[in-house]
Amino acid sequence: MSLADLLTQNPKLSVVVVAFLITLIMTLITKKFTNQKRMKELKEKQKELQKNIRGDPSQMAKSNKEMMDISMELMKHSFKPMIFTLVPLLLFFMWLRGIYEPILSSWFWWYLGSGIISSIVLRKALKVV
């Protein structure tokens, strides 16, 4: 029995399992290839600046510039794992589409919902920023 046959026996359940496994792999790659300590520091500083924005209007411009700099650095860190995963994921999705589209037209929405929920749970469980 091939993997494609196994996936098509119970398509909704298999999409959920595949989404969880892909999300787990992506979360582990993100944890390995990002500086988690630095990202946590940046997120905490960002929260602190958001509190300061509500105060003095003269401080608002300075805080906004700092928040923009922090956001850019966070984005730079989050792009590192994407470099390693983009092409393999695109190829994998093309393969999945070929399997699921004929039998489950809403497979992508099942995948997306399962992936979002899995990501929230796994990031908290694995302490990934």
Image (tube, rainbow, N blue to C red):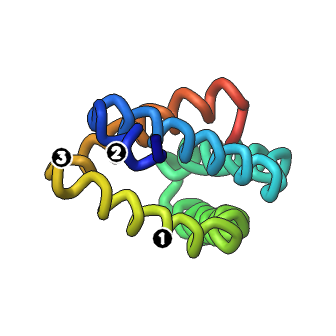
Quarter occupied by residue 47: top right
Residue 62, percent from left and from top? 62, 67
Residue 24, percent from left and from top? 61, 40
Disc 2 marks which residue? 111
Any mark on residue 104, and which? Answer: 3
Q: Quadrant of the C terminus?
A: top right
**Crowd around label 3: few <14 · some 14–19 · many ≥20 (10 Å):** some
- Observer-nearest residue: 118 or 76? 118
Disc 1 marks which residue? 90
Cα gap from disc 2 to disc 1, whole angstroms: 14 Å
**Crowd around label 2: few <14 · some 14–19 · many ≥20 (10 Å):** some
Which residue is at 63% across, 66% downward? 85
Q: Secondary structure at mark 3?
A: loop
The label nearer to you, 3 versus 1, is 3
Does 38 sit left or right of 92 as displayed? right
Quarter occupied by residue 16: top left
In this picture, is 126 found above or below 92? above
Which residue is at 58% across, 47% downward? 52
Task: Name which residue type carries label 2.
Answer: Tyr
- Observer-nearest residue: 27 or 72? 27
- Observer-nearest residue: 16 or 49? 16
Does 4 sit left or right of 56 as displayed? left
Which residue is at 73% across, 52% downward? 29
Cα gap from disc 3 to disc 1, whole angstroms: 19 Å
